[in-house]
Image (cartoon, rainbow, N blue to C red):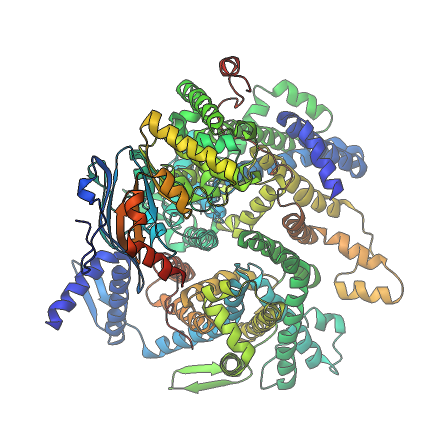
Amino acid sequence: MSESSGTERQTATVDSDSIEDPLLEVDGLRKQFGGVVAVDGATFAVGEGSLTGLIGPNGAGKSTTFNCITGIHEPTGGRVTFDGQEITGLPPYTLANRGLVRTFQIARELSDMTVLENVMLAPDDQVGESAIRSVLPGLRDDVIADEEAVRDRAWETLDFFEIDHLAHENAGNLSGGQRKLLEMARVLMTDPEMVLLDEPLAGVNPTLEEKLLERIHELRREQGLTFLLVEHDMDVIMNNCEHIIVMHQGSVLAEGDAEAITSDERVLEAYLGGEV
Amino acid sequence: MGLVANAGDSRAAVVDRPGAVAVAAVLGYLVLDLVVKLSGISVFFLGMQVLGGSLELGSLLSMVIDGLLVGLAVGLAGIGLSMTYSILDFANFAHGDTVTAGAFLGWVAAYIAAGLGTGAPIAELFMLNSGRQLSTVSTFVPVLLGLVVAGVGSVGVTLLVDRLTYRPMRAAGNISLLIASIGVALAMRYLIAFVFGTQTSGVASGGLRITFFGTVSMTDNEVTLLVVSLLLMLAVHLLLQRTKLGKAMRAMADNEDLARVTGIPTERVIRLTWILGGGLAGVGGYLLVLESGTISFNFGWILLLLIFAAVIVGGIGSIYGAMAGGVLIGLVDSLALIWLPSGLTRAAAFLVLIVVLLLRPSGIFGGVTTA
Amino acid sequence: MSVAESVRDRLDALPDIGLVAGFMGAIWAIMLVLALSVGGAEWANLAAGFIGSVTVLIGGYAILALALNLQWGYTGLFNIGIAGFMAVGAYTTAILTAPTDPAAGAVAGLGLPLWVGLLGGMLAAAVIGGLAALPALRLKADYLAIVTVAFSEVIRLTVNWSGLAEFSLFGRTLGTGGATGISFESANDVAGSLVNGVGAPVAAAFQGVGVSAPNLANLTYGLMLMAVVGASYWVFARLTNSPFGRVLKAIREDETVTQSLGKDTRVFKIKTFMIGCALMGLAGVLFRGQAGYISPSQFRPTITFYVFAALIIGGSGSNTGSILGAATFSGLLFYLPARIGENVPLGTRAPSNIVEAVAALGSLDPFPLVAYTVGNVSTLRFVLIGVVLIYIIQNQPDGLLGHRNEPAASVDLDRSRADLGGESDE
């Protein structure tokens, strides 16, 4: 199944079919910008509750794959399935409401809003997002009750990521690492089932990196969240992900556990080839 | 085989781009209607006239000439707006008032030159209210001098405005620059009003009428507009094609990506943008007054939206697009009279602007390389 | 810079209601001083006239600035078609309420009561605003600006068109009146009847000191407009300090992120356009149609730019700032210079044009130039407005209050007490 059409590639050890309880399935995903094919028939699956790594040399199509899955770009071809339902080409807000959310490679904080506002924005279907309810006196009681609940959850989430001391600060004043934490906090407030993390550790100092990874594992353990992680740091991927997908030139080159990937010669070649 | 493929293509076009197809249908109807009207046939359906009527070829040609004249001047003025939009990355709402400023400077010079030795008081000449009507044939040298002063003067005005307003904010966002230009527009317009008053002055009127095709005629002033704007457009073309700086500017104006890669444009390119754009705007304004005969403190401001329409229809950033867009919008503004009552023709030109922005934001000629 | 900062610090220390009251009080005091110094025995009537007119202006611009603040300040939608939406509201109200049996030469309407007309006007402006928002879903900010300003001109030219001046619809004759305009039930009459009815004793006291009935009605109307400003502020403050407002701010900051967090930003943008345009439509009739008459020339794009100037001065993104900006703009920049220019005696030596004024400098007589300048100050004030706009954008882009952090939430955002008790800072 994971063979991309027209090539004779074989996957390393684990076949997509063998992923138990796949939450996200990507099948023959293709994205073309003008004449450039950025993603060329990528096929893989992410098991429910797993921490899956997505790696590949620069230009392998990882970010474009992310953008196609999360509705930022409309794919040129292929199918994306989430939780058993096809989601190909659906807009980002629909996906987020279904529990599929993402973070961005370069943290995109809402800089002229406070940290607390950033986090409180995220929950789905807040009562006060209705213009009429937020204004009319009789209807507003529900808004207040909902707001109080959201606020309390926001504080808890900020506590969890240890950025509560920055709650009233404008997000634009945060350091790079703090912004990454804020993005994670914000995404969690949407109550997701699955989070796509686009290089969450880039530019983050080792202490913070440790902290972030700890949080990710904790969320998996305690809330059963699924993570798909794009990361450049091989060690991080090898040490934390039980399943790893390697992309090269727009399609999946290999997948399997850390051991299988490190022993795969094609992976080595792709990386060396990419370097030269 | 080819036929089948074509049918499939056109079906796909209807589905993918319903707006464009609707526009094409409307245009097709208008062209058909025009032909039927010219042949003097009326077509009725259910008692309503759906096609045709009557239209003299002569009046159609007059409308075309009117539209062409206004369009050429608007196109000249539009070059600067298009260039600032792409090179400095903002919509310059003060551009219309640059047109006015250039026109006033030029006409004051022309008036004083024409009035010297006639005993007219200098104050009356300066205020453009001696009542004299200039024309190219009767006062050739003053009109020519005014043209040069309009160009040079508006260059001076734009450079001064850039120095005071835009240069301190080179790093600012495009909306900040747009708002600053609104401030510049207000300040310029009312400084002109402060000096020259708010009345409309008649300053020019054709001295000679040339008739051709029996029914169509143009005044000497109109011919001047036609010739001067065509010559200037040719000059701009040569500048862009033959000089190194011109080529660099064209590349930057035409290609946003290139502009982004090369980073903030050099002060040299910016200065040339203002010089070229400002000068042509002033000349365009001067010529429009020569053609219409009257001048007032806010005529450029009123014209601004039409210039925007020209630039957007031609494709923002494209210098040739601005010229062609000007002519096109001038023609729409004038030919709309065939189908619409006179009160709505200007609205039609603005609707064209809106429709183009919605359906084809890169402009009608967008995507066509100008190299 | 430091002056501006110290002004700002002092502003920050005041509660919002005190700020607005202080600004209004100061502007009224300036008007009173002007009336006292030029009015002689007529000072009371003059003061009532000045204060009434300036209050009407402030009220009108404050409503418009609040509406624009929702669209641009909060959501980042650069709408420069304000004049057009005002026209939609004003014309709808006018057509709904104009008498069915008009005076000779005037155009007939539907003769409905004023409140129906006002509601209808707001509704029409909201619908047209919602339609205009559709391009906003896909256009860049500066393209949207051009589309909206072109749209507003299309509206103005359409109501100006003689073909719509008078027409028949379902057997009734109505129309826009074309370039001549349209007369309808004057909102000012409401103020007039207040003065003659409930307020008669107060009115008598004012008239006792020489305030004329029209000036008194005008002053009353200004205060009524301020009440509309208060109500609009109340609505908009609740609207923006809520999850709804939070989404609007997020759209302004980064629309992609907002979508990625599950918000259908298109719906929010359309709603914002509709709500803001409804208020613009209301201002169109209450402000421009105060005297029960409107014409197309009252809805030129310049008024749009004045609203922008007001909002930028006050600080885009702040509701309170919108009102302060409207007061500063219309009181100090727009109204005051014109009144000073009118009331400074120039004598007979004032020159008729600038050439004579400058020529006199040659004989070392600066008076003609000064006299010319003062005499034309109502023109120069627009130069001043332009220069102030440039100065603010260059040096104080946050205006008076835009720097403020007004978190968009319906509740106090500090940690709740229960939470604090549970797990204080560890």
Using residue B105 as the reference point, say whether residue B208 is left or right of it: left
What residue is drawn where x is 22% and y is 46%?
Answer: A13
What residue is drawn where x is 61% and y is 38%?
Answer: C403
Image quadrant for the N terminus of chain C?
A: top right
Rendered image quadrant of residue B283: bottom right
Kindly tell me whether residue A85 is visible in this rendering: yes
What residue is drawn where x is 35% and y is 52%?
Answer: A56
Image quadrant for the C terminus of chain C?
A: top right
Rendered image quadrant of residue C259: top left
Q: Compared with residue A116, is residue B259 higher up or lower down, i.e. above or below?
A: below
Q: Compared with residue B254, is residue B57 higher up or lower down, i.e. above or below?
A: below
Rendered image quadrant of residue C130: top left
Using residue C40 as the reference point, say whether residue B42 is left or right of it: left
* Image x and y of residue A185, in percent: 44, 32
Kindly tell me whether residue A125 is visible in this rendering: no
Front residue (pair B21, C57): B21
Disc count in the image? 0
Toward the right, the furthest residue is C364
Q: Compared with residue A69, is residue A47 higher up or lower down, i.e. above or below?
A: above
* Image x and y of residue A193, in percent: 31, 32
Front residue (pair B226, C235): C235
Front residue (pair C117, A168): A168
* Image x and y of residue C399, in percent: 63, 41
